[in-house]
Image (cartoon, rainbow, N blue to C red):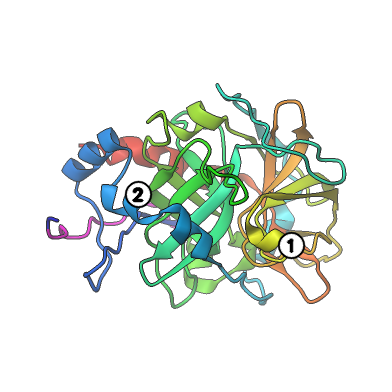
Amino acid sequence: MAAPSKPSPEVTADVGTVGAIAPVKLPGYKVARSYSAAEVGAYQRTGGDPAVLGYWTPKRMEAAKPLDAPTDAKAVNRALGVLTRKLPGLVTPPAPSTLSTRTGASPAAVTTLSITNGKLFIDGFESGSWCSASAINTPSKRVVVTAGHCVHAGRGGTWRSNLVFVPGYDASSSDHSPVGVFQAFSLRTFRAWGEESDLNRDVGFVTTYNGGDRNSTVVDTVGGHGSSFNGGTEFEVSVFGYPSNRDGGDTMSACSGRATDSSPSDNISKIACNFGPGSSGGPWLWEYDNSTGLGSVRSVMSTIDGRGVNRGPYFDAAVRDLRDLADRDWDTRQP
C-alpha cells in the first residue's frame, strides 16, 4: 500500500460554509489522509478507494454502532431563521431511478420504503458508526443529504472519515447492500455547525464517487429526492431512517405525521416519531409518493429528547446554497 499523500486543502467555501475532501484513515496510520487530484481520477474508475470499500464488509457494517445525536443546545442562528420563514418557496424536483425504488412495507401512511434512502457508515477501523441519509437530485447526480453531525463532529471536533453510503441497506437480507456502496468524495456543512454546534445548521452534504454495482452515480442508480426550501416549518411529512431502537437499526423504518413548530425563537420542526440514535440525517420528505419512492427533502433528522420528540432544522435558501456548493465540488476538484 502506498504511503498517504499530503492532505489536500479544504474545498473552497463561502463565509457561511466549510467543506473538505472526505478524509480517510487507513489501518496502520495515525492520522487521516485526503486524496490528490490524480488519486481522485484513479479512484473514480474503481468506484472509490479499494482499501475503504474492502473494509466495509457486511460483518463490519453489522458491528457498527449508531452515532449519538447531539443534545438540544441553545441555537445561535435564530434571527436568520425567523426571517427566512417568510421567503417564497424554492423547489427542486425529484429524479427517477433506473431501478425499482421499492424495498418492502412500512407502517402508517408509508407503504413503500425507498432505496433512495440508506445508511451512511462513518469512521471505522477503530469505532465504526452509522447515520441515515438519502440521495437527492442535483446536476452532478452525486449528492447525498444527511445531518451536519454525521459529516463533522461540531464545535471542537473535526471531519468524519471513511464515509460510505449504502442505499436500501438491509441487514435482514442475504445481500445487505442491494445496489452496492458509494464512497464519499467530499463533505459539506455550515460553519455555524462546525464551529458552534448550532442545531439550526445541523445539515450536511456528501458528494460521492461513481460506485455501486453498476459503477455509476448514486442518483442514476437509485434516483434522487427533490429538495424544498423556504416552505415553512409545519408540514405533512414522512420520515425515514435507521433508528437503533427499532429492529436494532438493521432495517429501514418510517414515520408519518405532521411536523410542527411551537417555538417562536427558532425554526426547528418537531415530530413525535421516537426515532433513536442512528436515525440522524434521515430525510424528512414532503409529498412522499409511495408509487415512486420519491419525495422532497424539507429537513433531516437532528435530535431526539426524552419524550421521543425528534427535531430537524429548517431548510432555507442557505441550505440550498450549501447543496449547490456540494454539487459543484466534483467538477472543481478534478485533475
Mark 1 — residue? 275
Residue at the spot x=33%, y=51% of the render? 54
Q: CA distance from mark 2 to mark 1?
A: 28 Å
Amino acid at the residue labelled 2: Leu
Question: In front here: 193 or 98?
Answer: 98
Which picture quadrant has residue 126?
A: bottom left
> In the displayed structure, does residue 155 sit left or right of residue 276?
left
> In the displayed structure, does residue 201 sit left or right of residue 237?
left
Residue at the spot x=69%, y=53% of the render? 314
Residue 248: in sight, yes or no? yes
Question: In front here: 323 or 212?
Answer: 212
> In the displayed structure, does residue 294 sit left or right of residue 12?
right
In x, y percent, where is residue 150? Answer: 52, 61
In x, y percent, where is residue 288? Answer: 76, 35
Mark 2 — residue? 53
- Vertically, is 19 above or below 183? below
Name the residue at the front extreme.
174
Q: Secondary structure at mark 1?
A: loop
Quadrant where the C terminus is found in the figure: top left
Q: Is residue 13 magenta?
A: yes
Majority SS type along the magenta span:
loop
Decide which of tag 2 and tag 1 comes sooner along the chain. 2
Magenta segment boundaries in residue numbering: 3-16
- Vertically, is 293 above or below 53? above
Q: Is residue 269 magenta?
A: no
Quadrant where the N terminus is found in the figure: bottom left
